[in-house]
Image (tube, rainbow, N blue to C red):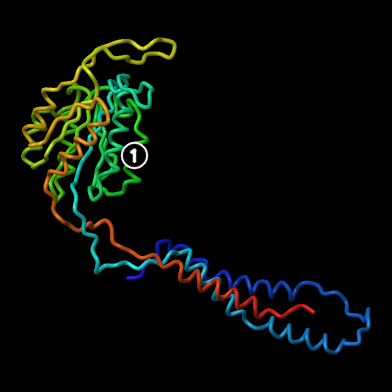
Amino acid sequence: MLQMSAPFWLLLLPLPPFWWWAQRIWRRRSPRPAHGAALYHPLAQELITLQQATATKNRQLPWLWFLGCAAFIIALARPQWLLLDAPDNRRGHDIMLALDLSGSMRAEDFTLDGKPVNRLAMLKKIVSEFLKNRDGDRFGVLVFGDDVYPLTPLTADRQLLQQTINELENGMAGEKTALGMALSAATQRLQASQNQRVLILFTDGSNTAGTIGPDAALQQAKLANVQIFTVGIGSEQEVPFPRAVSQAPALTVMPLDDALLQRMATETNGAYFHASNLDVVKKLGAALDAIPVITQQNATQTPRLEWYWLPLLLGLTCFYFQQQRRPVAP
């Protein structure tokens, strides 16, 4: 089936004929210099004949120019052929990423490229590296702090996902940790999936906010057959925590609730990982590869062929032959 990706360009199709007609009207109404013999030429009659022939050609409609302009406009509209008989079947998982953006993620207990970074920077690096190697999988992203904020639906658009991860900042979802509500919201968004439902929960703390507790949310996930993988970000030692610009970071202890994260994973046939470095990316990928997947049609993406080059080539050809037909000035 043929469709135009940018059909609004087709509104310009009447413009070339109108421009040609307007130029002719303007030339007719523009004042002409008085005729008079300023110079006698031995080939005057031949020049007059050539001028009359040129004027006759100029009065003819420039069909090649019209066709070339129309072809260029159609190329701008980007014609595409949809391959409806070739569904985009994929094999992969449907995965929700629940990312902790609470205030404790400002703690600086990691090092990347020889520089100290906070927990959120390490989380973004882990997720970015993880997304690069998951062809066929669809991901959804939600963040949580005082509350839960879904950012993307389940999608295979890696560019959108990476842009979303890059824009995350500390505290944008609040300072506390609504762990139970994040688990409940992710479960609800996975219920429409026909594939194995997987949740990867990245957090550095325990539940400190929200109206739904972790235990109630865990039971909801179990009933929906959601497999939970938990990733603990941070250490149990004293870590630098930034304060005001003029103050040195304060050393404080922000321990993980390892017992809760391990229980969430165990009761849903998932796994718990402690992210001390980027090696967790390989471990998490290996665990997901062991989960069976089904082949299903990706209804959000239909294979298509770009045909804009056909009218573009036609337009160039028409302009070339139109140029060849122009009379040579005497």
Q: Quadrant of residue 97?
A: top left
Q: Quadrant of residue 121?
A: top left
Quadrant (top left/top right/bottom left/bottom right) for the N terminus: bottom left
Instruction: Say which residue appears at 31% left-offset and 27% top-offset.
Output: 120
Instruction: Say which residue appears at 93% left-offset and 80% top-offset.
Output: 39
- Tell me where residue 263 appears, x and y as whole percent: 8, 28
- Tell me where residue 107 appears, x and y as whole percent: 30, 19
Q: Residues within 10 Å of mark 1 (few under 14, many from 20)?
A: few
Judge left or right: residue 6 versus residue 172.
right
**SS for callout 1:** helix
Instruction: Say which residue appears at 32% left-offset and 66% top-offset.
Output: 82
Q: Quadrant of residue 252?
A: top left
Judge left or right: residue 29 versus residue 146.
right
Look at label 1 and name its amino acid: Thr
Is residue 249 placed above or below 14 in the rendered structure?
A: above
Quadrant (top left/top right/bottom left/bottom right) for the C terminus: bottom right
Report how many numbered discs are placed on residues in the image: 1
- Tell me where residue 125 appears, x and y as whole percent: 32, 33
Determine which residue is flagged by label 1.
164
Judge left or right: residue 244 versus residue 255.
right
- Tell me where residue 152 appears, x and y as whole percent: 28, 43
Instruction: Say which residue appears at 69% left-offset and 75% top-offset.
Output: 24
Judge left or right: residue 249 versus residue 222.
right
